Image (cartoon, rainbow, N blue to C red):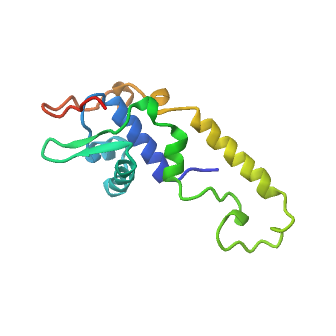
Amino acid sequence: MRLTSFSDYALRMLMYTAAAGSRLITIEEVARTFNVSKTHLNKVANTLTRSGYMKAIRGRSGGLILGRRPEMIRIGDVVRLTEPDFALVECFATGNRCVLTASCKLSGMFDEATASFLNVLDRYTLADITLMPEDFLGGQIPPVRTGATRKTV
């Protein structure tokens, strides 16, 4: 099983935001930090803000902040939100044409494995995987901008 880059970037963006503490972050700085597409991160940020995991603050001093406390953001929930499906084998996907579907026992096994995978992720929150600012680019997270702090969520 492999997560999409969308899920990967969503988790990284949340980790980066949590590490920034009270400072608002920007998509541009996250893109620079991880050397990924700003356009792709805009889509990730949009998904995370629509679902309440992050909040967007508009204006010149705006940016992104966590929409919930890190201990309230379960990793399994983020992965469920950002993964398009968990179709590990053809019979899970729309348009299944496998001739074994009626009698195959693989689908039950893969269903169980997927459920176990998600159950493990559900035991962890963003608080469990939050890093220190110095863990990003050798501590190159920019300092707090004046007037750009977040309020307690």
Q: Residue at x 29, y 31 (%)?
A: 140
Q: Residue at x 40, y 39 (%)?
A: 14
Q: Is residue 143 above or below residue 112?
A: above
Residue 72, placed above or below residue 109: above
Q: In the image, residue 70 lies at what x, y percent?
A: 41, 31
Report whether 82 appears left or right of 30.
Answer: right
Up-down relation of residue 4 to residue 142 (above or below): below
For the view shown, which residue lies furthest in the right direction?
A: 103
Q: Residue 89, position in %: x, y?
A: 71, 61
Q: Nearer the viewer, residue 127 or 13?
A: 127
68 or 104: nearer the viewer? 68
Image quadrant for the C terminus?
A: top left
Q: Quadrant of residue 20?
A: top left
- 59 relative position to 41: left or right: left
Labels in figure, total = 0
- Residue 137, by quadrant, is top left
Task: Identify the residue shown where x is 71% and y is 65%.
Answer: 90
Q: Residue at x 34, y 48 (%)?
A: 49
Residue 28 in picture, x, y percent from top left: 26, 47
Q: Position of residue 54 (x, y in %)?
A: 34, 43
